[in-house]
Amino acid sequence: NLKIEILGQSDKRIFLGGLNGNWFEVNVGDFKFTKSDFFENYFGEQRFGNKCENHNIGKLILLRKYNDEKVLERLYLNSYQSYLWNFLVYNYVKKDDGFDVDYCVGKYRFLKKKIKNLDVPLINFDTEFKGIAKNYVKILENEGIKTSDFLIRQKPYLVSDTVFRDLICDVKEISYKNKVLKFFLGKGSYASVYLKKVISS
């Protein structure tokens, strides 16, 4: 039941990262909607695959225990980085007033009041352990992983620099009418995570 509407055209090429964001329109049915104009910017379950095991394969790649086609290896490695990012953020915000929601590889912690936004790195070989990133030290110890493991010299296509992700995602242009929820999110943020925060039975 997919519907595509052509909005226009441009003489400029579409490129990865060029998106500003996405508008969403969701029929929430009989579920209850609790308005919030922000959420903790976790990676959504789709990042971890249908069986929620992509992050496990990503870890095996770092431990040099897995080989596959190049495109899939990048996907698996990114999934593991996302898993560690989610875990870091959950532990960072769990002391604040809020509530937990289960997802396929752990828990999300959603807060009732917005806190200061931070740039949170996805762990990599060049990540500096300062600020919120200091909490990666213990996480990596427990995982049996070192930052140097991300330097896979046999597979240079998997080596990249540290990238950062906002701790908090602002939700814009929110409207709710006749069981239909509409909102706008910046690029890279997951509507499915926002819905886990604001929709309940």
Image (tube, helix red, strand yellow):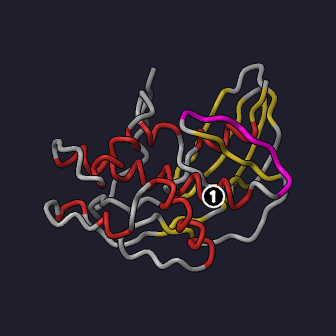
Q: Find disc 1 in the rendering and name its residue.
A: 89
x and y, in percent, of residue 91 in the image: 68, 56
Please state if 118 lies on the left or on the right of 72 as rendered: right
Quadrant placement of the N terminus: top left
150 lies above or below 34: below
Please state if 29 lies on the left or on the right of 18 as rendered: right
Q: Is residue 97 magenta?
A: yes
Residues 24 and 91: in front is 91
Q: Over which residues does the magenta segment extend? A: 96-104
Q: Main secondary structure of the magenta part?
A: strand
The residue under label 1 is which amino acid type? Val
Please state if 101 lies on the left or on the right of 139 as rendered: right
153 lies above or below 46: below
Residue found at x 56% / y 63%: 138
107 lies above or below 94: above
x and y, in percent, of residue 23 in the image: 57, 46
Residues 18 and 165: in front is 165
Residues 194 and 132: in front is 132
What crowding class fits label 1: few (fewer than 14 Cα within 10 Å), some (14-19), or many (20 or more)?
many
24 lies above or below 62: above
x and y, in percent, of residue 26 in the image: 63, 32
Q: Secondary structure at mark 1?
A: helix
Q: Is residue 138 magenta?
A: no
Residue found at x 77% / y 24%: 31
Residue found at x 82% / y 58%: 96
Residue 54 figure quarter: top left
Residue found at x 49% / y 69%: 164
x and y, in percent, of residue 48 in the image: 44, 39
